[in-house]
Amino acid sequence: MNVYRICGMDQAIVARLLSKSKYLSGLQCRKLLWTQVNEPTVIPTADIVTQHVFDQGHLVGEYARQLFPSGIMVPQDGFMENIFATRRLLAERRPLFEAGILSGTLYCRLDILHPVNDDEWDIIEIKSSTSVKDVHIYDVAFQKHCCRKAGLTIRACKLGYLNKGYVKHGAIEPGELFNLEDVSLRAEDAGTGIEERVLDLLDLVSNRACPKVSIGQHCLEPYDCPLRADCWAFLPENSVFTLRGGKPRQFSLYEQGIMSIQDIPDDSGLSRQQKIQKDCVTTGITHIEKDELRAFLDNLRYPLYYLDFETIAPAIPLYDGMRPYQALPFQFSLHTVEDEKAQPIHHSFLADGMNDPRPVILGELMRLLGSEGSIIAYNAAFEESVLTESVESSPEYTDWLQGILPRMVDLLRPFREFHYYHPSQQDTASLKRVLLSLTGQGYEEMGICDGMNASIAYERIAYGTATEEEIARVRADLIEYCKLDTEGMVRIVDELRRLSAPTR
Ligand code: SF4
C-alpha cells in the first residue's frame, strides 16, 4: 500500500478530494460537480424525503453487514481516523465495513471490503434498490480504481441489492433478503478511461469559473439534480416541461427551441390531450366534456364510499408476509354518502405501530363498506393493490375482496382522460391539483400536506423515538390530512355534477 503524509489535512482539503459521490456528480453534470466543490452552500440541504431515503439506506446497510458475521466496523469518528484505522485493519484480513481509502486526491468509503485468497479483496457495494442500475456500476468502478491506486488488489466487484421476491417470515434472513451479483465485467468496462476522466474532473473543479451547461435529461438522471430550481428558473410559466406526455416529448420540443406550450405548432403531432392542454393554456378557459362527465357520474351507485389509504413502503419488511417496499397501509379515511340527499359521514382508522395494522384495517373496512354501492378512490389501482396485497397475508378476507373489487371506481379517470381540464393543473391530474382547480381548496395550511410526508411522519412516530407530545400532534395532523383527501373527493364529485348538469 501507499504511505501518505496526511496529518493536518483540514476540512478545506477534504472538500477538494474527488470522492465517489463527487465523481458520480461529475458524470451526471459538470456544473453540478463544480458547484458542489466550489459553492457548496448553493446546494440545498437534503429535504425530509431525501433524508428518509438515506435513512432507509443505512438500515439496509446494517442488515447487509449481518452477511459477514466476522466483519469489523471501521471506526468513523473522523475522516482521517477512519482512513488510518482502515490501514491498520487491512492487515487483519477480515471483512471491513465502512473502510476509508485515500489515494492522492481520490477517496472512497466502501460498504464492505471482503478479503479473498491471500492478498486480494472483493468490493461489495450495498444498495437499497431492487435492481442493478448503471450508476451503481460507475460507483463500484470508481471504488475499484481508488483501491487499486491505493495498492489493493481487487479480485471482484459485487453489488448487494434487495431481493424483491423475499417474503418475511419470522426474523429477517439477510441471506435471503439480498441478491449478491458479481458485476466485475461491467465495472471493468465502466472503468475504461477512468484515469483521464478523473484528471478531467479534478481539472474542472480547480477552475475558477463555473462551466456553462444547458439543461437536459441529465438534470433528471440518474438523480434529480438539487440545482434544478435554479437552472430551470428561466423557463416560462407554461413551459413545454408542463406538457402532458412525458419527458422525451418535452425535451424534443425544447431542443427545437420551443419554450412555451402556446408556441407549439398545431401541426407538430400533439395528442388529443396535449391539444386540449394547449388550447386551455392559450385561452385560459377550462375544458369540460359534459356528456362524458355525466356518463361517469351515472355509473356511480349509492351508497357512495370514498376511500383513501395512507401507506408506508419500508425497504426492510416490517411484518410477516411482507416484501421489500411493499405498501403497508397504516391509515384510511372513508366518507360514506347514503343517498343523493344525505350528508357525508366520516370514518377513519390510524394504526399505533404496535402490531401489523392490515388485519384490523380489513376488518374495519369489511364492517363499513357494506355489500353494495360504489367504492370511489382517486387512482383506484393503488387502493386495489393495497387491499389485494393485504389480503394475501389474511386469506380469510379473500371472498370479501372479490366482492368489493368490482365496486371500485377510479375518480382519477375523468381527469386523466381530460373530460375536465383546468389550465392550472399543468401536467398533473393529482387529487390535490384537481381539487384546488375545481374548488379552490388547498392543503397549504395543513400540518401534513402530502402523502410522502404523511408516510415519513407516521414512521417517525410509530417506529422512531418521538415524544408523547409529537405523537399526539402528528396523529392529529395525519387524521386531518387523510380526511381532507376523501372529503376532497366528495367535493370533486359534487362539483362535477354541477358542471355537467344540462343547461336550461
Ligand atoms: S440542473 Fe441540470 S444543468 Fe443544472 S447543475 Fe443540475 S444537472 Fe446541471
Image: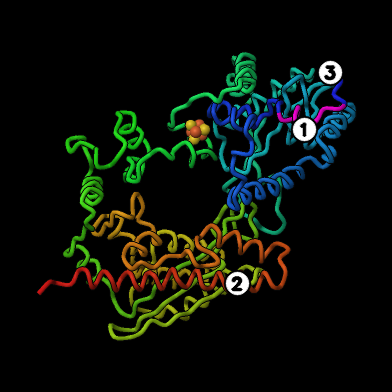
The answer to whether residue 242 is above or below residue 441 is above
Residue 467 visible in the picture? yes
- The quadrant in which the N terminus is found is top right
Q: Where is residue 478 in the image (x, y as percent from the top left)?
A: 55, 69
Q: What element carries label 1?
A: helix
Q: Residue at the left extreme?
A: 504
Q: Upstream in the sequence, badge 3 or badge 2?
A: 3
* Residue range corresponding to the magenta coloring: 8-15
Label at residue 11: 1
Q: Is mark 3 on a helix, strand or loop?
A: loop
Q: What residue type is labelled 2?
A: Arg
Q: Which of marks 3 and 2 is in front?
A: 2
User: Is residue 479 located in the magenta-colored stretch of the structure?
Assistant: no
Residue at 75% over, 35% down: 112
Q: What element carries label 2?
A: helix
Q: Dot 3: within a 10 Å radius of its alpha carbon, few (fewer than 14), some, or many (20 or more) residues?
A: few
The answer to whether residue 179 is above or below residue 428 is above
Q: Where is residue 394 in the image (x, y as percent from the top left)?
A: 55, 68
Residue underneath mark 3: 1
- The quadrant in which the C terminus is found is bottom left
